[in-house]
């Protein structure tokens, strides 16, 4: 059994994740992690699995505060490597565990942002990610009445940790990486292409 095999992780998720909504979020963050692993020359499979797993325990945690520590223990028992477990633990600010690796900073940066991009996508006329530009994302970020439950502070902090200026984000790699993500994740199509985020940093 290779825990780093993507199919194995999908089976693991099937056992722990109850809702489509959470699966969509995990797939979205996975796609973003793949895009950024290529941009930053990270280990794409490692980063992708971290993205897939980061919230797997959300629906089974005894309390919201015990996420993701509760899940980290399960991952450890299951044999996932420590760098995955650290990434999962450090995406939760309240664990107090400092983010160190680029993978950890990236996971934190894309987590909240991916939900925000999805919200921006859903208010476009065609509900298509193709119509979402970094500019439109920035405009919506400044609109305090839009997607109020998305934590802007985490998005800004995530960008700062990556050393990128959110206010001057460009389409550095958006088109190609998005296409690559889609090509790489054909089974994600069942959830709609609009759910795969376009990297905007
Ligand atoms: Fe989380
Ligand atoms: Fe998340």
Image (tube, grey):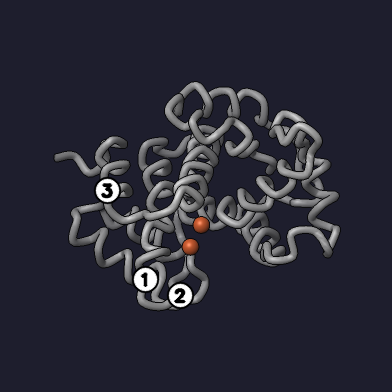
**Cα–Cα gap, marks 2 and 3:** 21 Å
Image height of 82 relative to 46, above or below: below
| Horizontal relation, residue 96 to residue 170: left or right | left
**Tag 3: Cα neighbours inside 10 Å, few (<14), some, or many (≥20)?**
some
Which of disc 3 and disc 2 is earlier in sequence?
A: 3
Image height of 158 relative to 138, above or below: below
Disc number for residue 61: 1
Pointer 1 with pointer 2, Cβ within 8 A: yes
**Cα–Cα gap, marks 3 and 1:** 16 Å
Res. 42 image quadrant: top left
Q: Is mark 2 within 8 Å of ligand 1?
A: no
Residue that carries the numbered disc 3 in the rendered image: 12
**Cα–Cα gap, marks 1 and 2:** 7 Å
Q: Residue at x 70, y 32 (%)?
A: 128
Residue that carries the numbered disc 2 in the rendered image: 64
**The N terminus sits in image quarter:** top left
Instruction: From the top left corner, tell me how far across and down residue 13 is, in percent.
Output: 32, 49
Instruction: From the top left corner, tell me how far across and down residue 148 is, in percent.
Output: 74, 65
Pointer 2 with pointer 3, Cβ within 8 A: no
Residue in front for this viewpoint, 88 or 120: 120
> In what element is the residue under mark 1?
loop
**The C terminus sits in image quarter:** top right
Disc number for residue 82: none
**Residue found at the very far left of the displayed protein:** 1
Instruction: From the top left corner, tell me how far across and down residue 194 is, in percent.
Output: 63, 34
């Amino acid at each position: 059994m290779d825990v780093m095999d993507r199919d194995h992780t999908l089976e693991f998720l099937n056992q722990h994740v109850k809702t489509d909504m959470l699966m969509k979020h995990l797939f979205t963050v996975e796609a973003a992690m793949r895009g950024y692993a290529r941009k930053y020359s990270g280990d794409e499979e490692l980063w992708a699995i971290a993205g897939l797993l980061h919230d797997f325990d959300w629906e089974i945690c005894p309390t919201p505060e015990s996420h993701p520590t509760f899940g980290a223990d399960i991952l450890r028992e299951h044999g996932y490597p420590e760098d995955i477990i650290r990434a999962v633990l450090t995406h939760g600010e309240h664990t107090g565990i400092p983010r160190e690796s680029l993978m950890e900073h990236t996971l934190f940066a894309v987590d909240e942002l991916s939900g925000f991009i999805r919200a921006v996508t859903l208010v476009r006329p065609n509900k298509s990610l193709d119509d979402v530009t970094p500019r439109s994302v920035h405009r919506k970020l400044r609109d305090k009445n839009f997607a109020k439950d998305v934590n802007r502070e985490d998005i800004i902090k995530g960008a700062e940790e990556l050393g990128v200026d959110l206010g001057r984000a460009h389409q550095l790699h958006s088109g190609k990486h998005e296409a690559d993500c889609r090509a790489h994740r054909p089974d994600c199509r069942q959830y709609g292409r609009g759910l795969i985020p376009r990297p905007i940093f």
